[in-house]
Image (cartoon, rainbow, N blue to C red):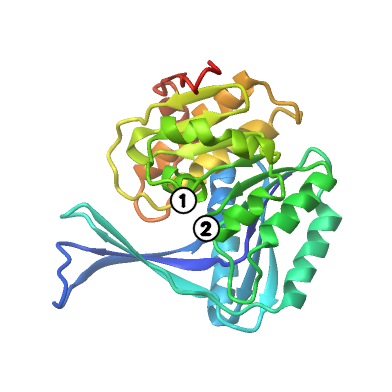
Amino acid sequence: MIYTVTLNPAIDKTIYVDNFMLNSVNRVQSIRADPGGKGINVTKMIQNLEGESVAITISGGRTGLMLESLLADGNIQYQSFKCKDETRINTKMVDKTNNQFTDINEPGPIVATQLIEKIEAYLSDVLCKEDILVLSGSVPRGVTKNIYKKWCELGKKLGVKVLLDADGELLYEGIEGQPYLIKPNEKELASYFNVKTTDPYAIADKCEVLFDKGVEVVVVSLGKEGCVLLTNENGIIFKAICVEVKSTVGAGDSMLAAIAHSLHALNSHDYSLNELVEAVTLGVAASSASIEQEGTIMGKKTRILELKQQVKYKNLKIGAKL
């Protein structure tokens, strides 16, 4: 099973406004609401790929009930833990006229330590060897920044492959827990290494530090430029597919979902380079398929498989390694 953790979920409210203008009255053309949060997005994409995933999340108040209702309506498997405060609402504004996408994200509830302990106990009970655990996104107020580190260590102890997608201190602390794979973008890695450059070749040369810490795979998102797959001995750069961009929300989550799904389908925890390349190839296609969709809608399997045939990659020369 693939388990995803979303500690700070949201109702993603997408509003469509033509020719948005500041300091002016703007008329909303249409609105849609979706269950949101990075881990939930990962589970949604895994479902689209006909895989199995359980979204572990926190819900509170009226918006929490709405979140659970949206998950149920989408036939998404989930395990919810109740908090006292309201689940947040994130507003995504899409201006098709100017091709602009704006996110306004609320901070989320304050979560008690006891609730986090309940989630940790649940993870300890349900996780089994050969499972994959996806830790992604922000955490609500009241949760320590080393939470992903603790749960990476828990996963490693239980023989579970942990995939980590976070930024800032959550990423820095999480790396110390030795996740199997991390998926930062080039700016997040540049910040981690405290360098100004965001050049993927320059950053790739520095990733030996990550491998020394116990990370086995690094997938670096490069936006319009594609992504880079790095292991201790190999580097592969994937070109982005040219598609019509309708919304970038959930693109990175779609990539991580496809990677998790592809690896889990192998029924093995000893992945070869070819299997990793195949997983990231599916990830690039899944990300591209979601970019073609509006709001937080995930790409469909048929389109993903079509786009997969268009993915191109080549070796990335890292220092003297390749």
Residue type, mark 1 in image: Ser
Indicate the position of residue 311 as horizontal and vertical percent values: 42, 24
Residue type, mark 2 in image: Gly
Q: Are marks 2 and 1 in contact (CB under 8 Å)?
A: yes
Q: Residue 256 or 141: which is nearer the viewer?
A: 141
Locate residue 33 relative to residue 125 in the image: left or right: left
Q: Quadrant of the N terminus?
A: top right
Q: Is residue 247 above or below residue 120?
A: above
Q: Is residue 128 above or below residue 91?
A: above
For residue 49, what is the image quadrant? top right
Q: Is residue 232 above or below residue 53?
A: above
Q: Is residue 276 above or below residue 12?
A: above
Q: Residue at x 76, y 42 (%)?
A: 131
Q: Disc number at residue 318?
A: none
Q: Residue 8 or 235: which is nearer the viewer?
A: 235
Q: Is residue 264 visible?
A: yes
Q: Residues within 10 Å of mark 2 (few under 14, many from 20)?
A: some
Q: Is residue 303 visible?
A: no
Q: Which residue is mark 1?
A: 191
Q: Which is in the foreground here, disc 2 or disc 1?
A: 1
- The kind of secondary structure element at disc 2 is helix
Indicate the position of residue 252 as horizontal and vertical percent values: 47, 45
Q: Residue at x 16, y 55 (%)?
A: 97
Indicate the position of residue 260 as horizontal and vertical percent values: 62, 39
For residue 162, what is the image quadrant? top right
Q: CA distance from mark 2 to mark 1?
A: 8 Å
- The kind of secondary structure element at disc 1 is helix
Indicate the position of residue 289 as horizontal and vertical percent values: 40, 38
Q: Residue at x 84, y 56 (%)?
A: 124
Ranked by sequence position, the earlier of labels 2 and 1 is 2
Q: Which residue is mark 2?
A: 168
Q: Residues within 10 Å of mark 1 (few under 14, many from 20)?
A: some
